[in-house]
């Protein structure tokens, strides 16, 4: 995974005042024959960032991202793999709580937006997130 892929994660971790920092990473479908190793390296990179409380992988080779994170020292008790984005959405609905900061990232083909849509319908957005969502709708 290129370092630029970790940039949003690194920036998010610098935002203080959150209860937990949660990475929900979908399979990167465009990686080709080196996909497994690059996902594993991404997991190592994510685990190296102080402050990530939970790492969730979604679909296919994202399992290697979770595995790589655990190899690099992230707690296996705070890492989970989901076969589909629908399964991940269902699982995180009751897991995510007010005060959590989530970074949801992955290839469009993994349909990570299903996780975001489920969370938005289940949890009210507040503060900056609500304002950002309203501004995005105005410009759409």
Image (cartoon, helix red, strand yellow):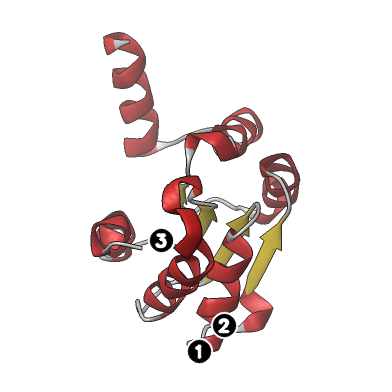
| Nearer to me, 42 or 32 | 32
Q: Which residue is mark 1?
A: 73
Q: Where is residue 123, by image quadrant?
A: top right
Q: Residue at x 65, y 82 (%)?
A: 76
List x then y, in percent, for residue 121: 63, 28
Question: Is 121 above or below relative to 49?
Answer: above
Q: Kindly tell me whether residue 15 is visible in this rendering.
A: no
Frontmost residue, 127 versus 23 = 23
Quadrant where the image shows the N terminus: bottom left
Of the residues under marks 3 and 2, which one precedes in the sequence? 3
Residue at 57%, 83% in the rendered image: 70
Describe the element under mark 2 as helix, strand or loop.
helix
Tell me: 2 left or right of 61: left
Q: Which residue is mark 2?
A: 70
- Left of 49 or right of it: where is 95? right
Circle 1 sits in a helix, a strand or a loop, which is it? Answer: loop
Residue drawn where x is 34% and y is 60% of the image:
9
């Amino acid at each position: 995974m290129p370092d630029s892929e970790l940039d949003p994660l690194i920036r998010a971790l610098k935002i203080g005042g959150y209860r937990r920092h949660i990475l929900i990473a979908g399979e990167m479908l465009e990686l080709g024959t080196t996909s497994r190793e690059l996902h594993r390296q991404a997991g190592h990179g994510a685990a190296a960032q102080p402050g990530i409380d939970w790492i969730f992988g979604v679909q296919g080779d994202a399992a290697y991202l979770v595995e790589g994170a655990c190899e690099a020292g992230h707690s296996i008790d705070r890492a989970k793999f989901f076969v589909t984005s629908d399964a991940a959405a269902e699982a995180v609905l009751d897991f995510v709580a007010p005060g959590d900061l989530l970074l949801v990232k992955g290839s469009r083909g993994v349909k990570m937006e299903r996780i975001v849509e489920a969370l938005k319908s289940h949890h009210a957005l507040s503060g900056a997130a609500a304002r950002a969502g309203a501004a995005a709708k105005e410009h759409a």
